[in-house]
Amino acid sequence: MTKDKPSAPPAKHVPQRTCIACRKTGVKVRLVNVPGVEVVVDPTGKKAGRGAYLCLSRVCWDNALKTGRLAQALRTEINPDNKAKLLNYTAAFGNSRPQA
Ligand SMILES: [Zn+2]
């Protein structure tokens, strides 16, 4: 009966995946700056490179791209083509409910 511990969060360092647009934590999509190429979505979260996280929310992607926050977070510039591609990705989110 000693294994019945309360489920306290582990004390070790857990990287917080904060959405760069709304600063919420939770389910995120990772975007990676592939040097010399462009910013790509990284669904596996395993690509090497500087990454940033965004919610599965179109609003956040919009904000992050339009305010340049994504470019800033990735220390790069995102050309219009690349932006369009990324925004295109948000179409997959469809009319997902706004996250509370
Ligand atoms: Zn967000």
Image (cartoon, rainbow, N blue to C red):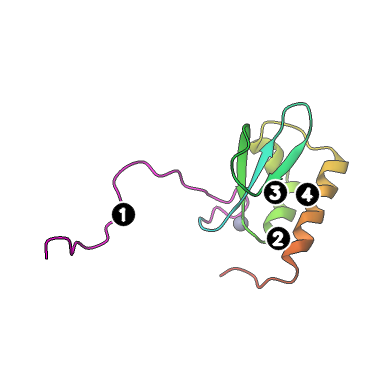
Residue ID for mark 3: 64
Nearest the viewer among 99 and 93 is 93
70 left or right, relative to 5: right
Q: Residues within 10 Å of mark 4 (few under 14, many from 20)?
A: some
Q: Residue at x 72, y 27 (%)?
A: 35
Residue type for callout 3: Ala
User: CA separation, marks 2 and 4?
Assistant: 13 Å
**Which of the marked residues, 2 or 4, is nearer the chain's N terminus?**
2
**Which of the marked residues, 2 or 1, is nearer the chain's N terminus?**
1
Residue 9 numbered mark, or none? 1
Q: Secondary structure at mark 3?
A: helix
Residue ID for mark 2: 59
Q: Residues within 10 Å of mark 2 (few under 14, many from 20)?
A: some
Residue 96 numbered mark, or none? none
User: CA separation, marks 4 and 1?
Assistant: 34 Å
Q: Secondary structure at mark 4?
A: helix
Would you say the magenta stretch is mainly helix, strand or loop? loop
Query: Residue 61 at what x, y percent from top left?
Result: 71, 54
**Which of the marked residues, 2 or 3, is nearer the chain's N terminus?**
2
**Which of the marked residues, 3 or 4, is nearer the chain's N terminus?**
3
On whether ligand 1 comes within 8 Å of the CB at mark 2, the answer is yes
Query: Residue 42 at what x, y percent from top left?
Result: 66, 45
